[in-house]
Image (tube, rainbow, N blue to C red):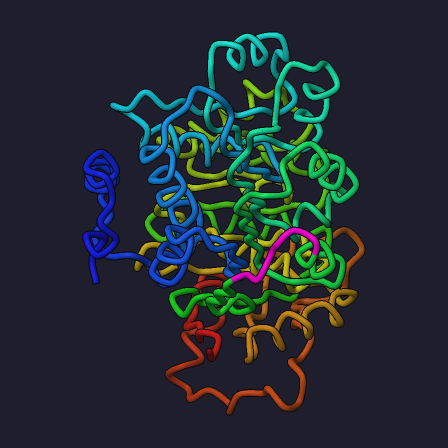
Amino acid sequence: MSFHHFSFHPQITEAIERCGFTTPTPIQLQAIAPILAGRDLLGLAQTGTGKTAAFMLPTIQHLLDAPGRHVKVLVLAPTRELAEQIHEFTSSVLAGTRLRSIALYGGVSKNVQIQKLRAGIEIIVACPGRLLDILNDRAVDLSRIETLILDEADHMFDKGFLPDIRRILKKVPEKRQSLVFSATMPEAISHLVENILRNPVKVEINHTRTVESIAHSVYGIEQGDKPELLIQLLRQPEVMTSTLVFTRTKHKAKSLANRLEKEGFRATSLQGNLSQNRRQQALDGFKSGTYNVLVATDIAARGIDVSGISHVVNFDIPDTAEAYIHRTGRTGRASMSGEAFTFATRDDSRILRDIERTLDGPMQRQAVKLPAAAQTAGSNRQTVSPPAPPAEMRAPAPSPRQRGRGGSSSAGVFGLRTRSRN
């Protein structure tokens, strides 16, 4: 089925062609028709499935059918990066129309945002905190909202935005179309959905699994040896062409990017201590290829829309299986293959097993052998093996050919990897 099936306005059809879309993704195929029909919708799908187009294309169709110079659509997003991504896509679709979109988030001038709002805006894409600030200034009127969209609702719960969302809900009309998209559905989000949606259509696209195009490997490693292992991996530029590295803290993201720079890599960091301009520069540089390594905290897990990421590296293992899904969903997109590498210490056994249960299969175990000079001071081990997978998931022993060459650090790192079983 093509996008022509939905009988979009000619200007939307032109935008679809400009974006290079050919056939709808599963979430678009199932969500667009009910949204066009005015139904409330709950969409459960992981990142990288085309959710933004799934909700924005039919929403813009409604606006073109009934134009009016006031705020009609409100999209709430948990991070600046995601808000900007949605706004950029929306603006590209609106090109050639009289409709306007704005992204509202902290870190930039609120006064400039208020001036743009007063000039006339139909679509607001906002982070809850900045939107509440502007509402408190009485600089925006949400009383004529026709469509309310919550994107990455579970992440907004993780970031503690639910009280803010409830305050915002009091400012929008009860009679409206509401759309909620989430990768997971924790209990708190379920309660919120019950209050927001009325007789919704539910669309669920394999929302707890990583895509089949991603191969998953885990490396047993001491904490202090992680930088050296990462450097060994990145010394294969023909393999790791565009790499997103996740760390647990802002300080570690910055210091690790600095070390990689000193080692000669084109690396930068994306973390909360940066100004919005510097964060945008890092993202733009990663998209354009100025940098081929981006070291980031989880702030980037939901807001990066960069095609062609070859590898995601969990320098620090995430706290939940859901976070792992979101991180690794940055690769293996648009029919391309990708690889996810996870550095695991002995303390990571529990979360590693949780992740593998979510994957429905074990990751490929990769033993690590570093040069003696690079090993952690005082360490008397030669190799550290990752924790074993749960017994019910253990794969058959690989054949000699599957084991790879072994011996050298290169073979140990880049030996054959298996894909998770979906």
Asked if residue 393 is positioned above or below residue 87 in the image, the reply reads: below
Whole-percent x and y of residue 150?
Answer: 58, 45
* Range of magenta residues: 195-200
Task: Give the residue at x 67% y 84%.
Answer: 390
Whether residue 280 sits left or right of residue 224 in the image: it is left
Camera-side residue: 365 or 131? 131
On screen, residue 310 versus residue 345, left or right, reads left
- Residue 14 appears in which quarter of the rendering? top left
Q: Which residue ends up furthest to the front in the rendered image?
A: 175
Whole-percent x and y of residue 164?
75, 36
| Direction from residue 81 to residue 221 in the image, left or right | right
- In this view of the protein, which residue sits in the foreground, 93 or 394? 93
From the image, give the main secondary structure of the stretch colored magenta.
loop
Quarter placement of the N terminus: bottom left
**Which of 307 and 239 lies nearest the eye of the viewer?**
307
Q: Is residue 75 visible?
A: yes
Residue 29: x, y in percent?
Answer: 33, 61
The one of 66 and 105 positioned closer to us in this rendering: 66
In magenta stretch: residue 124? no
Residue 216 vertical placement versus 133 (above, below)? below
